[in-house]
């Protein structure tokens, strides 16, 4: 049973999700949270990971470490995405097993589900069709992580849960022009419009693709909730259960940051990605979890964090 004195290890504590989990654990009063830098622990090195986990003996592990990126990066660096993610998660899951860790949460992504599956996306749609081609390498790595957790649970009676979050955003996000996800990219673009006192926004694709987003503090809340919750299901979707068009998000962020709507130009030479992607979160709700932070409040919090982080 996990309590406030239990040793909890966060892999990926400086990333978007890992840092949110760390903040939440500290606020709640967990006293024995451990983490380490890339310089001190190379998660792609199996022997280093095994040694770290054997020495530190955590009671619980959050696997939030991953190589992530937007459409451009996923499409053009597939070898790095599949290799690094397979190495990181395999080393951590196998290392956890060797160190006697019986409980962990592996964080995946909604991209593990088929490109053209029914909407909203249910957990049992996994491996029921072809993946989106632009990020299939990353998706396959994450699917391997899910199957690895399931296999260890079945063979060794462990409690390795897999949470599949939708697009998350918030403090410590990646705002790089080519490598970020669409939501932080929108925040940065609209911030730059504000700096230039402009009224013109260029969007990739036609703006009609629909996406679901979740504020990262809600995702962190879900992680800690399911850390403590006994569940029959080991694969659980985490999201808001609501989706809107890219154009809608652009205008909402513009309204909140600029106080006005903007003139949108669509760069149709760029990909749209999947037309619609929204998670069915009925299993998470069945266990008593649901998101708490409104989209408008989340955008304002994220923008404040963006300005404080002094992202160029």
Image (cartoon, grey):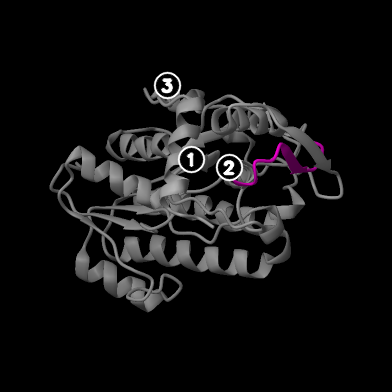
Local packing at callout 2 (Cα closer than 10 Å; few below 14, some 14-19, many 20+) is: many
Between marks 3 and 1 in the image, the one whose residue lies nearer the viewer: 1
Q: Looking at the picture, does residue 211 appear above or below residue 57?
A: above
Spatial separation of the CA atoms under disc 2 and disc 3: 33 Å
Local packing at callout 3 (Cα closer than 10 Å; few below 14, some 14-19, many 20+) is: few
The residue wearing badge 3 is 286
Q: Residue at x 50, y 42 (%)?
A: 169
Spatial separation of the CA atoms under disc 1 and disc 2: 7 Å
Q: Earlier in the sequence, mark 1 or mark 2?
A: 2
Does 201 lie within the magenta span?
A: yes
Name the image quarter holding the N terminus. top left
Are the residues tagged 1 and 2 within 8 Å (C-beta)? yes
Q: Is residue 305 left or right of residue 237?
A: left
Residue 128 rendering spot, x and y as whole percentages: 69, 40
Residue 268 seen in the current view:
yes
The residue wearing badge 1 is 303
Does 295 lie within the magenta span?
A: no
Q: Is residue 190 left or right of residue 209?
A: left
Residue 103 rendering spot, x and y as whole percentages: 30, 49
Q: Residue at x 81, y 50 (%)?
A: 270
Q: Earlier in the sequence, mark 2 or mark 3?
A: 2
Element at label 1: helix
Element at label 2: helix
Residue stretch in magenta: 195-206
The residue wearing badge 2 is 187
Q: Looking at the picture, does residue 90 appear above or below residue 132?
A: below
Element at label 3: helix
Q: Looking at the picture, does residue 40 appear above or below residue 104?
A: below
Local packing at callout 1 (Cα closer than 10 Å; few below 14, some 14-19, many 20+) is: many
Residue 304 rendering spot, x and y as whole percentages: 43, 40
């Amino acid at each position: 049973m996990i309590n406030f004195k239990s040793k909890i290890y966060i892999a990926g504590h400086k990333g978007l999700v890992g840092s949110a989990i760390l903040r939440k654990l500290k606020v709640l009063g967990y006293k024995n949270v451990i983490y380490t830098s890339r310089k001190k622990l190379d998660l792609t090195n199996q022997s280093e990971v095994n040694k770290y986990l054997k020495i530190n003996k955590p009671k619980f592990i959050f696997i939030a470490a991953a190589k992530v990126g937007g459409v451009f990066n996923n499409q053009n660096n597939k070898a790095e995405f599949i290799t690094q993610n397979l190495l990181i998660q395999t080393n951590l899951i196998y290392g956890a097993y060797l160190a006697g860790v019986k409980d962990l949460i592996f964080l995946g992504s909604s991209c593990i589900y088929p490109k053209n599956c029914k909407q909203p996306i249910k957990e049992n749609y996994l491996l029921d069709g072809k993946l989106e081609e632009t990020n299939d390498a990353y998706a396959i790595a994450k699917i391997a992580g899910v199957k690895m957790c399931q296999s260890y649970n079945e063979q060794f009676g462990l409690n390795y849960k897999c949470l599949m979050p939708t697009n998350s955003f918030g403090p410590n996000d990646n705002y790089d022009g080519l490598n970020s996800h669409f939501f932080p990219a929108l925040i940065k673009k609209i911030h730059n419009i504000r700096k230039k006192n402009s009224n013109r926004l260029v969007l990739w694709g036609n703006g009609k693709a629909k996406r679901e987003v979740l504020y990262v503090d809600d995702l962190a809340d879900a992680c800690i909730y399911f850390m403590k919750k006994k569940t029959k299901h080991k694969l659980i979707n985490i999201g808001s259960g609501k989706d809107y068009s890219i154009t809608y998000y652009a205008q909402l962020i513009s309204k909140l940051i600029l106080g006005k709507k903007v003139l949108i130009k669509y760069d149709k030479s760029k990909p749209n990605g999947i037309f619609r992607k929204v998670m069915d979160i009925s299993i998470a709700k069945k266990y008593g979890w649901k998101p708490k932070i409104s989209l408008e409040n989340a955008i304002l919090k994220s923008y404040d964090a963006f300005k404080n982080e002094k992202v160029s």
